[in-house]
Image (cartoon, helix red, strand yellow):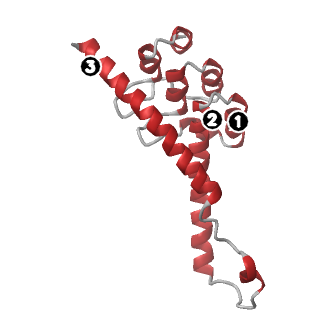
Amino acid sequence: MGNTGKNLRFRQRNALCSSYTRDIHEFVYHVYHGGHNSTSGSEGSSGGGDPPAPATSTEEKKKKEKARVSRTSLILWHAHQNDNVSVRKLLEEDRTLVQSRDYDNRTPLHVAALHGWIDIAKCLIEYGADVNSQDRWRNTPLADAEGAKKPGMIELLKS
């Protein structure tokens, strides 16, 4: 029974993985193609004056938050795509991204472990990834690697 429950959770996570990929695609498209309504067209050349300071401050906060969310999504996306160069570049810019979480509370290390991306996992561990972090199902990256039958990843995470 215990093994059946574990297999069911793994199948549920696998089904969510394709949903996760779709969600990331939609998010990345939205970030890069929609809603960047900064100064455009004739707005910049109209003599209407500067916007009030509180609006500017609010806009700056929104931009910073959007950039943070974007970087969080990007590191999870690049970990999913086995893009070691991009993961390393993002971590060099902001080491805290190693602890990023998605909507299922999964870290980039969970994603790498599930797919068996050893180079990504080594990079994340090098930058301080928590190998004991738990997702919303209380699974660790090691549990994901074991469920996906990734022996190289299992060995790395146990060492």
Residue corresponding to mark 1: 86
Compared to 68, does 75 lie above or below?
A: above
Front residue of 117/126: it is: 117
Compared to 59, does 113 lie above or below?
A: above
- Residue 63's spot in the image, x, y percent? 61, 62
Q: Secondary structure at mark 1?
A: helix
Q: Residue furthest left?
A: 1
Q: Earlier in the sequence, mark 1 or mark 2?
A: 2
Picture quarter containing residue 79? top right
Using the numbered discs, state the Cα–Cα distance from disc 1 to disc 2 in whole angstroms: 6 Å
Front residue of 30/63: it is: 30
Q: How many neighbours does mark 3 have within 10 angstroms: few (below 14), some (14-19), or many (20 or more)?
A: few
What's the amino acid at mark 1? Answer: Ser
Mark 1 touches mark 2? (CB < 8 Å): yes
Q: Residue furthest right?
A: 45
Q: Is residue 22 left or right of residue 5?
A: right
Using the numbered discs, state the Cα–Cα distance from disc 3 to disc 1 in whole angstroms: 36 Å
Q: Residue furthest bottom?
A: 47
Residue depicted at x 63% and y 35%: 78
Q: Earlier in the sequence, mark 3 or mark 2?
A: 3
Q: Secondary structure at mark 2?
A: helix
- Residue 93's spot in the image, x, y percent? 71, 43
Q: Give the position of the N terminus as an image quadrant.
A: top left
Residue corresponding to mark 2: 78
Numbered circle sitting on residue 5: 3
What's the amino acid at mark 3? Answer: Gly
Picture quarter containing residue 2? top left
Q: Is residue 87 left or right of residue 145?
A: right
Using the numbered discs, state the Cα–Cα distance from disc 3 to disc 2 in whole angstroms: 30 Å
Compared to 155, does 93 lie above or below?
A: below
Q: Give the position of the C terminus as an image quadrant.
A: top right
